[in-house]
Image: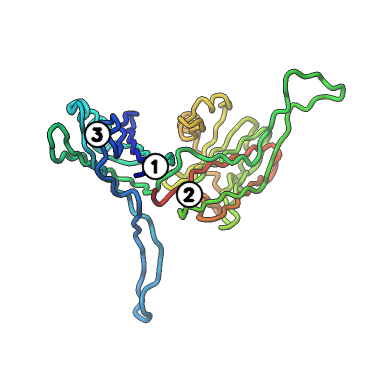
């Protein structure tokens, strides 16, 4: 049998690990439903003059994960822990680990239902509703498109002709491969200016879509030291300006995997500037297959540092 562990951690960072074998673990998995497949709502329309129907679109339904487990050992203590991890309506993260491969999904608690008791062992059924039905990797992938690289090393002797302390590395085009079947994966795009940059933009070549900050008649100038943070994830599409915050302050806010938590950063330092969104633009997202990402600016492009963060979604584990 595969080595499977299911760890649920609530929004207060209290967690429980369920395993198929006891292995000194008082929470023993009996059943795990709702993680291996997916269901969709398929929309069609019928026409009185044609056979069959016309496909309009489809959306993935919410995911209902049901954990059935036995509790052994200190029953009262472990029961209390179960209720602490799964209080009604609260959010949490389920981490599914199989032979070292880990995927996560967020949930809300629907119910915790006691079942049969056999001696000192009692069954419990835990129902979790995942409004976002996709499993995801543990952390974001960062794609650096343009940045400044330090050339300063100690120990060093100054050349009579001067010393270059750093240089700019830039790739106007990056390809992101998404081969897991999921469409509409949001990205986080970061612009940082080391001089004045006018109307920066990110483009998705395959779809022809782009997101541009500033346009004719409503220009936007990013000043030196400022950041623009763009979220294109479903349900939280926004553009933020960070002004007066240093890179060191930003890097104080990292997740447990060492990646910058940009949601926390913008909640602390950001100002929404959606009024500068180009009316012909769109909050671009990654699609299944190859995604070619480029960037540009009407002026000051050589002052621009650009990074794109994304996290691949999975229809099941």
> What is the x, y in percent for residue 306?
62, 39
C-alpha distance separating marks 2 and 3 = 30 Å
> What is the x, y in percent for residue 97?
39, 40
Viewer-nearest of labels 1 and 3? 1
In the rendered structure, are the residues bearing label 2 and label 3 in contact, judged by CB atoms less than 8 Å apart?
no
Viewer-nearest of labels 2 and 1? 1
Number of the label disc, if any, that sits on residue 98: 1
C-alpha distance separating marks 2 and 1 = 24 Å
- Reply above or below: 152 against 104: above
The mark nearer the N terminus, 2 or 3, is 3
Query: Which of the 4 image quadrants contains residue 205?
Result: bottom right
Disc 2 crowd, CA 10 A, few/some/many (<14, 14-19, 20+): some
Q: Residue at coordinates 66% horizontally, 46% vertically from top-left?
A: 296
Tag 2 residue: 185
Nearer to us in this view, 182 or 220: 182
Number of the label disc, if any, that sits on residue 31: none
C-alpha distance separating marks 1 and 3 = 26 Å
- Reply above or below: 236 against 292: above
> What is the x, y in percent for residue 137?
45, 42
Residue 256 shown left or right of residue 201 in the figure: left
Residue 31 shown left or right of residue 310 in the figure: left
Q: Residue at coordinates 67% horizontally, 46% vertically from top-left?
A: 172
The mark nearer the N terminus, 1 or 3, is 3
Nearer to us in this view, 128 or 59: 128
Q: Residue at coordinates 28% horizontally, 29% vertically from top-left?
A: 24
For the residue labelled by badge 1, is the local secondary structure a helix, a strand or a loop? strand
Quarter of the N terminus within the rendering: top left
Nearer to us in this view, 48 or 275: 48
For the residue labelled by badge 3, is the local secondary structure a helix, a strand or a loop? loop
Number of the label disc, if any, that sits on residue 87: 3
């Amino acid at each position: 049998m595969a080595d499977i562990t299911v760890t649920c951690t609530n929004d207060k960072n209290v967690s429980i690990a369920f395993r198929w074998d006891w292995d000194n673990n008082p929470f023993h998995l009996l059943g795990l439903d709702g993680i291996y497949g997916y269901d969709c709502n398929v929309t069609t329309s019928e026409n009185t003059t044609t056979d069959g129907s016309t496909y309009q679109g489809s959306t993935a339904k919410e995911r209902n994960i049901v954990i059935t487990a036995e509790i052994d050992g200190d029953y009262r203590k472990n029961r209390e822990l179960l209720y602490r991890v799964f209080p009604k309506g609260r959010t949490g993260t389920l981490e599914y680990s199989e032979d070292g491969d880990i995927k996560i999904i967020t949930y809300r608690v629907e119910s915790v239902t006691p079942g049969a008791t056999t001696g000192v062992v009692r069954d419990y059924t835990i129902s979790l509703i995942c409004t976002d039905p996709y499993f995801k990797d543990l952390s974001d992938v960062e794609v650096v498109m343009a940045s400044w690289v330090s050339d300063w090393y100690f120990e060093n002797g100054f050349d009579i002709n001067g010393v270059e302390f750093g240089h700019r590395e830039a790739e106007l085009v990056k390809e992101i491969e998404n081969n897991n079947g999921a469409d509409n994966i949001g990205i986080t795009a970061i612009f940082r200016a080391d001089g004045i940059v006018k109307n920066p933009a990110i483009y998705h070549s395959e779809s022809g879509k782009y997101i541009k900050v500033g346009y004719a008649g409503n220009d936007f100038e990013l000043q030196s030291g400022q950041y623009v943070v763009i979220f294109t994830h479903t349900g939280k599409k926004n553009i933020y300006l960070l002004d007066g915050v240093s890179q060191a302050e930003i890097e104080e806010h990292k997740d447990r995997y060492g990646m910058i938590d940009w949601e926390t950063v913008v909640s602390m330092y950001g100002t929404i500037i959606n009024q500068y969104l180009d009316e012909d633009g769109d909050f671009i997202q990654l699609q299944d297959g190859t995604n070619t990402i480029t960037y540009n600016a009407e002026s000051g492009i050589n002052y621009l540092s650009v990074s794109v963060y994304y996290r691949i979604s999975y229809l099941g584990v």
